[in-house]
Amino acid sequence: MQVENLKTYYFTKQGVVRAVDNVSFEIYEGETLGLVGESGCGKSTLGFSIMKLIPPPGKIVNGKILFKGKDLVELPENEMRKIRGKRIAMIFQDPMTSLNPLMKIGDHIVETILTHENVTKEEAYTRAKKLLDDLGISRERINDYPHQFSGGMRQRVMIGLALALNPDLIIADEPTTALDVIVEAQILDLMKKLKEAYRLTLILITHNIGIVAEMADKIGVMYAGKLVELSKTLPIFEEPLHPYTEALLDSVPNIKLSEQTLKWIPGSPPNLLNPIKGCRFAPRCKYAEKRCFEEEPKIIEVEKNRFVACHLRG
């Protein structure tokens, strides 16, 4: 998949919110791309844009989303329905609100299969049971309802719904947000195993940079609707190029307790109704110069496969 100059805006009564503003990246088959950043930076909107599920008053206003040669932005809704779920699937943030409380777990999976594939209901149920086995859920629970499962088990079901049709790409939108650390670790281990078993290509959206350190082949750092850094995973942790990436890494608590000082990023993200003229991180950046407040930096390749939008690296 190749995303080129994507812009997704929300047209509100107060004005235009530039939630995703001129974002470009590529992801290749078998890769995991981690998208990180503070809440409200546009990560989820980017995921929903790829699925073409932007809720009103949101709209893709510019750019291309090239998936196996097709531009999804230009694709009519009836064609997009054939891709959504079958070729590109999404794991949503909150399984309790994403699952139908009146439908059994098995019916969720079976309906997904029958919608896209010409198989019998019996065949679909057989596949659903096999999928539950892969997810670590007893197949005897196929007739249970969502409220009968714990949060971690419901998230496993959501992962199963995304895997049901063996799609080419899965977008995981904060898949572990509402889970405690023990269940979070179990879900991440499950996703690693499933990635290998199903040869998944994955976009992992999260605010937890520790998760992408374990899971991602490369990382995209978003800030205020912009992609400010894109790189292979290890170099970002060894030497972050953007001041925001550096600040994110510095703010991760030290579990060894060798240093008791808790670091944070001063200030707040900008109002996307009226973002500043220059670099959107400039008011919070300890390296900011006069130019940073006057001129918006372009994202450039400063090293092989390392991209950054910062005047200090220009």
Image (cartoon, helix red, strand yellow):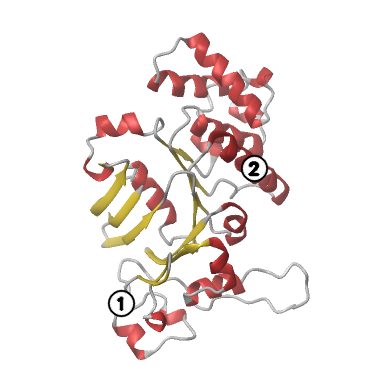
Residue extending furthest front? 304
Please give the name of the residue rendered at 78% of the width and 76% of the height, measured from the top-left corner: 258
Please give the name of the residue rendered at 63% of the width and 31% of the height, measured from the top-left corner: 135
Please give the name of the residue rendered at 53% of the width and 55% of the height, measured from the top-left corner: 217
The amino acid type found where label 1 is placed reads Glu
Locate the C terminus by quadrant: bottom left
- Which image quadrant is residue 307 in? bottom left
The amino acid type found where label 2 is placed reads Ile
Relative side of 272 to 39, left or right? left
Pinpoint residue 20: horizontal percent, then vertical percent: 34, 59
Pinpoint residue 86: horizontal percent, then vertical percent: 40, 30
Q: CA distance from mark 2 to mark 1?
A: 39 Å
Please give the name of the residue rendered at 37% of the width and 57% of the height, measured from the top-left corner: 25
Q: Nearer the viewer, residue 94 or 26?
A: 26
- Residue 291 drawn above or below residue 235: below
- Residue 136 drawn above or below residue 172: above
Q: Nearer the viewer, residue 18 or 210?
A: 210
Earlier sequence position, callout 2 versus callout 1: 2
Label placed on residue 187: 2
Q: Nearer the viewer, residue 181 or 122?
A: 122
Pinpoint residue 295: horizontal percent, then vertical percent: 29, 81
Q: How many marks?
A: 2
Crowd tier of the residue under label 1, counting other residues whose Cα lies within 10 Å: few below 14, some 14–19, many 20 or above: some
Label placed on residue 109: none
Relative side of 6 to 104, left or right? left
Relative side of 247 to 221, left or right? right
Q: Is residue 56 visible?
A: no
Crowd tier of the residue under label 2, counting other residues whose Cα lies within 10 Å: few below 14, some 14–19, many 20 or above: many
Find disc 1 in the rendering and name its residue. Answer: 296
Is label 1 in a helix, a strand or a loop? loop
Q: Is residue 307 visible?
A: yes
